[in-house]
Amino acid sequence: MSKTHHITLIQGDGIGPEVTGATRKIIDATGVKINWDICEAGAAVFKKGLATGLPKETIDSIHKNKIALKGPLETPIGFGEKSANVTLRKMFETYGNIRPIRELPGVPTPFSGRNIDLVIVRENVEDLYAGIEHMQSPGVAQCLKLISRKGSEKIIRLAFEFVRSEGRKKLHCATKANIMKLTEGTMKRAFEDIAKEYPDIEAHHIIVDNCAHMMAKNPEMFDVIVTTNMNGDILSDLGSALIGGLGFAPGANIGDDVAIFEAVHGSAPKYAGKNEINPTAVLLSGVMMLRHIGEFDAARMIEQALYLTFSSGCITRDVKVPGKNPVSTTAFTDEVIKNLGKEYDHEKIRPYKPIAKVAISQDVDFVKTKKRTVVGADIFIETTKPMAAFGPEMESFGHKHHLTLKLITCRGVKVFPRDHEISPDVIDVVRCRFMAPQETELEHKTLHALLADIESHYHWMHIEKLQVFDGVIGYSKAHGED
Ligand code: NAP
């Protein structure tokens, strides 16, 4: 007797019920025993006034079952509630977002025949998606990009283990470490360190913009790409366009305890209820789910049936094959079911194995240091004064407390002291960098006294301490700073 799996099913918004419905029907037709626990999330829940978009019953169900298949959820853009998708990923710490991009037989694209078969492994919790945003002044917004060594190690180890689980050979790490040396650089350094533990895997770092360029120019060169959250979001949509569009891009959100499977695409509201959308992306997410729960034969059966369906000319609206008319979502689903059990023998089948669990230290202070020195502070201040007047005023505040005003920057560009006549555009938030005398530490009481002086004339928004950890500088220099 085969095992019954308990899986949470979130049908989703827009086209969600159609694509998850098709997937459920096909998975059930393989004979795998699944007890689907259907739960609500997204637009309907927001409308009932629940700001998270996630009712307690849904959270409890995922917590209990540990596995969910999820349709897309709508997110209000630019205002209001947070994305329920992102909340789910954070709540269950599904830190690894695995997004395969594979050319399908019978789906013609400008890249057809090049055997694109790559996977994006995207960090899924940190980065700009930490969602920490503030208005510094009425006209200046800020978003905090948080990248930890622990988060980077976890996703990189998962990526290396994923490469092994699929019998792949190569891992690229795509970052913008050339510009963001601390945040994106943390992932690059973690990648270079951990790569030494996987000598069987070819490891390369690539700058993310060049990665996007090479994905469009020479996608065959990639096997697996691990990257930060924002980079991964963009690269995976780009990747989906190489193989026929978002209708073909599946995904898995993997955590230590919970895994949530969903397509890369959203709720495509203009197609909702029209019975013409492509269910492949969610179906392939279901295939990933079946492998995750150990149902390798059913996963293979669906993949083979899907290849056979497309290559026989049965296509959905988003696929263009000269002389072939698209069929409805339901007709396509029925055709895949009809083909279950038949073999499509031109396709390479990977030696899939379960992904080995990533085990790293659970210490909250993941990176230990012996000595920490606060050598200065960046204070962000709102002002409309010309820098020629504001700069000397900040210098005199600094002198009063035996601190040096190193520079003032606006949007990262040095605006005081001026080195040349070219004037950058100035906005009403500047960063003043105060340094303690060399070999000394900036004490809290000095910082408080400096702030009290500034506060009597200006709004200050926030402070960043300039710290040195075991002799390593823990802050970036400004453009133009020596
Ligand atoms: P989208 O829903 O992914 O749709 C963008 C376009 O992609 C569609 O107009 C369609 O292109 C194509 N497409 C998407 N799914 C397809 C499918 N199954 N078959 C064929 N083509 C498909 O992106 P969006 O319009 O930017 O977002 C709509 C909503 O979804 C937003 O509220 C957004 O926040 C949400 N969203 C949710 C998730 C998630 O739940 N994980 C992910 C992304 C977006 P054509 O117009 O060319 O036919």
Image (cartoon, grey):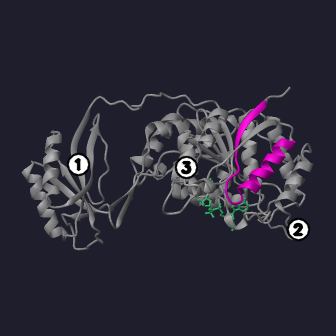
Q: According to the image, label 3 marks what residue?
A: 86
Q: Give neighbour class at mark 3: few <14, some 14-19, many 20+ (Cα, 10 Å).
A: some
Furthest toward the left, the residue is 400
The secondary element bearing badge 3 is classed as: helix
Pick whichever of labels 2 and 1 is earlier in the sequence.
Answer: 2
Q: Is residue 13 magenta?
A: yes
Q: Position of residue 31 (x, y in %)?
A: 86, 37
Q: According to the image, label 1 marks what residue?
A: 377
Q: Which residues are magenta?
A: 4-29
Furthest toward the top, the residue is 1
Q: Give neighbour class at mark 1: few <14, some 14-19, many 20+ (Cα, 10 Å).
A: many
The amino acid pointed to by label 3 is Val
Q: Looking at this view, is 198 or 315 the one in front?
A: 315
The amino acid pointed to by label 1 is Ala
Q: According to the image, label 2 marks what residue?
A: 324
Q: Position of residue 265 (x, y in %)?
A: 66, 57
Do the residues under discs 3 and 1 have CB atoms within 8 angstroms?
no
Side of 282 where 32 appears, left or right: right
Q: CA distance from mark 3 to mark 2?
A: 39 Å
Do the residues under discs 2 and 1 have CB atoms within 8 angstroms?
no
Q: Looking at this view, is 269 or 390 the one in front?
A: 269
CB of residue at label 3: within 8 Å of ligand 1? no
Q: Position of residue 152 (x, y in %)?
A: 49, 40
Side of 366 where 212 appears, left or right: right
Image quadrant containing the C terminus: bottom left
Q: Looking at this view, is 421 or 60 the one in front?
A: 60
Image quadrant containing the N terminus: top right
The amino acid pointed to by label 2 is Lys
The secondary element bearing badge 1 is classed as: strand
The secondary element bearing badge 2 is classed as: loop
